[in-house]
Amino acid sequence: MANKTGQKLKLLYVMNILLNETDEEHPLNANDIIGRLQELGIEAERKSIYADISTLLEYGLDIEKSEDYKGGYYIADKSFELAELKMLVDAISSSRFISEKKAKSLVDRIAGLGNVYDAQELSRQVVVPNRNQGRGEKTFYAIDTIYRCIDENHKMSFKYFKWNAKKEKEYRYDGESIVVSPACLMWFDENYYLVAYSEKRDSIRYYRVDKMDSVVEIDEAREGIADIDRKKIAAIARNSFGMYQGETRTVNIVCDSSIVGIFIDRFGYDIDITQKGDKAKLRIELEVSPQFFGWLSGLGNKAYIEGPKDIKSEYVSFVKDILKNY
């Protein structure tokens, strides 16, 4: 007769063992499960293990039996596949606004969504480079407040800053709080951006969340967001550089055919491309800014602006100003 110690919880332990320690490549047979239970101080017989598995199948757990000679059992349908967990880990690892401590904590939690073998695989994958150590928790609090404002249809206020050469915060707008109606959060270029309507500027604005301080919910209904088109917002983000806002223009660019892929990767498949020998002419709608000019100059003499004339002149002045330093 098996020892009755822990029998009331045995079914739950069997379920956890299957969830945490099995997959198609790592099945456990009845003897394996009995051994795991013994390590927990619970005695069991093969017959009771089969009964437990039958109960779990009836409950709805997707348990499959291995076709190998051991005839082990494993969980077939997991909440997350390993590839999906790896994508989440990669996103966290590449997020510069998340502190190293917070990133490792999040990765540990994500690893817990898989089994022990997934966790080992994920831990080998994680590379968290040095990053801003002081902003992680504050950014998470800011994100939480932003989502609460959106859910409750409230405005919000915050102070916006940049870093100076002394690594000190310099608050913009003379330290005055900015009041906006938040529309949504957008992930772009490894950073979170708030998309919001500014009544003061009567326009849609973008703010990097990790550069916000003193984020506060305001008990006033949001304004100006009813007509915000999220698809249009995504297009604007794709055609801007570092979310620096500028005038939206259609720019004609000529480049070597060998680097057309760079423009498709950056601006999408919808850009107009006309092939001319070993050159390609591109018509792209984008936000013209110094950041765009800097990106284009990185392509060297393989690409240049053909028009409009005023944009071309701005770019020439941009390059000449750089050359003054040499």
Image (spheres, rainbow, N blue to C red):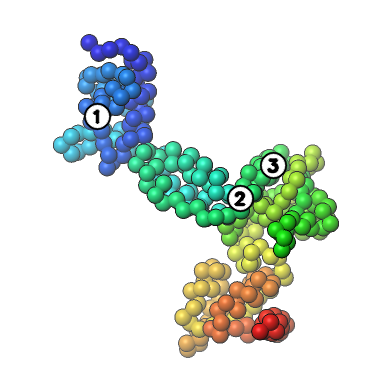
Q: Earlier in the sequence, mark 2 or mark 3?
A: 2
Disc 1 crowd, CA 10 A, few/some/many (<14, 14-19, 20+) = few
Quadrant, the N terminus: top left
Q: Residue 32 carries which label?
A: 1
Q: Which mark is residue 145?
A: 3
Amino acid type indicated by mark 2? Gln
Q: Residue at x 51, y 69 (%)?
A: 265
Amino acid type indicated by mark 1? Asp
Determine contact: label 2, label 3, CB under 8 Å.
no
* Quarter of the image where one finds residue 287: bottom right
Q: Which mark is residue 207?
A: none
Q: Residue at x 66, y 45 (%)?
A: 138
Q: How far apart are marks 2 and 1 (CA)?
A: 45 Å
Q: Distance between the residues labelled 2 and 3?
A: 21 Å
Query: For mark 2, what is the residue?
Result: 133
Element on which disc 3 rests = helix
Quadrant, the C terminus: bottom right
Amino acid type indicated by mark 3? Thr
Determine contact: label 3, label 1, CB under 8 Å.
no
Q: Earlier in the sequence, mark 3 or mark 1?
A: 1
From the viewer's perspective, is 212 left or right of 178?
A: left
